[in-house]
Image (tube, grey):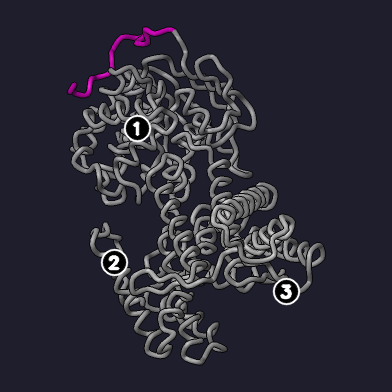
Amino acid sequence: MTAATPSVARPRMRMIPWRAPVAVVAALVISYLVIANAAGAQAQEQFINALTIGALYALIALGYTMVYGIIELINFAHGEIFMCGSFVAWWLITTMGFTGTIHDLPILVIVLVVVFLVSMLVMGVVGVIIERFAYRRLRNAPRLAPLITAIGVSFILQNLVFVGISNSIVKVPQLIPFDLLQIGPLAIREINLFVIVFAVALMIALQLFITRTRLGTAMRSTAMDREAAQLMGVNINSTIAITFFIGSALAGAAGVVQTQYLGNTVFNIGFQSGLKAFTAAVLGGIGNTTGAAVGGFVIGFLEVTSSVYGIGRWSEAIVFGALVVVLIFRPNGILGQQLADRA
Amino acid sequence: MTVAVAAPAAPNPTPSPSTLLRLSGVNTYYGRIHALQGIDIEVKQDEIVTLIGSNGAGKTTTLKTISGLLHPREGTVEFDGKDVTHTAAHELVKEGIAHAPEGRRIFSRLSVRENMLMGGFTRSASERAEDLERGLTLFPRLRERLDQKGGSLSGGEQQMLAIARALMSRPRLLLLDEPSLGLSPILVQQIFQLITEIKRQGVTILLVEQNALQALAVADRGYVLQTGKVILADTAAGLAANPDVRRAYLGEI
């Protein structure tokens, strides 16, 4: 998969327009062939499964990479934001009284919009609050201080859910049908189609926001040179807050996806998934939003592939092994880091 | 474009009476380091004022204190009659202070266009489009580079971009920190020509320069800083003629 991505030289050249799509298509074809080689008749289903799980990791990874890009903090609490998002979804769905699949499309759409919006909004606000009270004061402190704080926040959130909601796996009603849809030669379950399309749409929207809007450009400027951005008239505090809001909202969305695709959640899910999503962010090139998305899909693919090949127990070893191998040859990740300018 | 004008020889070359910027008894600290020790500086409307002094004298700190990147522990900064001592840097941009910092600080992964537009961050989209055009007329070199990444420009082009970007906020006061640093003599000439051109367009300039000779040639008045204090204040011509200044900062023996 890594071989298919464009090998951009160190002084980052501008992407030639055709290279990115070609790389994506090639990566998809190669990963499909790798899965098909072992999965046989289930090839298509497993391939789509890999994309779905990849989309989930990608959504979480974006928050890690955005926060790291702008304040160079590994926000260890980010996995917990994802976990809390899944519990918001669980709470909403059960209080609204749903117990299973909704077959009435308009109702399904309305419920999904409500669940996603509320979860994203709530987690976005939680992210902003965490930044405001836990990290902001430490912005100029030695880097270890906010890092430890982040771990502390992570424990607080985990334990709040552990004590306040449940200490074991919670089943969440899956609202979206698992029915197979036949789209041309492609057989895909509705849930998978939804997750992939939804996640990709969010990522495209994010990319457009970051690259095309005034606020997005302010975010990138702040990530590159905070002081210079201030001199342009950018309010650093609110820009960082917005970054936390967006990253956390995406994690909230990922939390909903988790409950809807896998049908359950648990208080410590944020640790495992968070760690893998963080790996995805590093794999893709920390600070680089496109890289985080790519890294997410790479990890989804590695996980599913290892289970297809009957070595699912080794999936974590394979994921982190891949990280090691990639970092040996491309220390800045697949697409390269995008961090602050060093004077 | 005008050639760098020689400093007026008249004893009092400051015709405009209105004070745009006034620092009174400013003390600024970097942690425990007492960087500015009671600085008094005044900049009048339509002037070019230069700060000269050796490394570590407090020139950059003075500019950072004015633009709000640092706040003084004692003393006041007044801009256009308003006390802005504790105003945040991003607010001061709206007030009309632009700061082209030392080392250019171009956003290296943003295009030249994006860099310019960031300079006009506080302004509306239509104003930004208009000012971009105006800036590109003043700096034609940047027009050719519009879609290149800021980091790919040469040092001289980056300095032009830094100044052009600062002008995008339509400042009344422009703070320039070492605009000629690391540039070839020809580019240094160009930069100083631009500085006089910018002044002609009605922007007041506070200029920090290592190149004291050039700075005094374009400036109306100047202050000499040494270890965080103003040790001398005079007209530019007066400073250029001062034997102590000539010995210490203009390289005369």
Res. A271 in view: yes
- Residue at 44% from the left image edge and 61% from the top image edge: A197
Secondary element under disc 3, as helix, strand or loop, is loop
Q: Are discs 1 and 2 both within one chain?
A: no
Amino acid carrying label 2: it is Val
> Can residue B238 be spotted in the picture?
no
**Going by the image, does B11 lie left or right of B185?**
right
CB within 8 Å, label 2 to label 3: no
- Check chain identity for marks 1 and 3: say if they share one: no
Kindly state the secondary structure of the residue where label 1 is placed.
helix
Classed neighbour count for the residue bearing mark 3: other residues with Cα under 10 Å, few (<14), some (14–19), many (≥20): few
Q: Residue B32 carries which label?
A: none
Q: Which amino acid does label 3 sit on?
A: Ile
Query: B81 or A82: which is nearer to us?
Result: A82
Q: Which label is found at residue A169?
A: 3
Q: In percent of the image, x 31 and y 33: which residue is there?
A: B164
Classify B63 as above or below A8: above
**Left or right relative to B239: residue A245:** right
Q: How far apart are marks 1 and 2 (CA)?
A: 52 Å
Frontmost residue, B230 versus A130 = A130
> Which residue has dot 1 on it?
B247
Query: Is disc 2 surrounded by few (<14), some (14 to 19) or many (20+) residues within 10 Å?
Result: few
Amino acid type for the residue under numbered disc 1: Arg
The residue that mark 2 highlights is A8
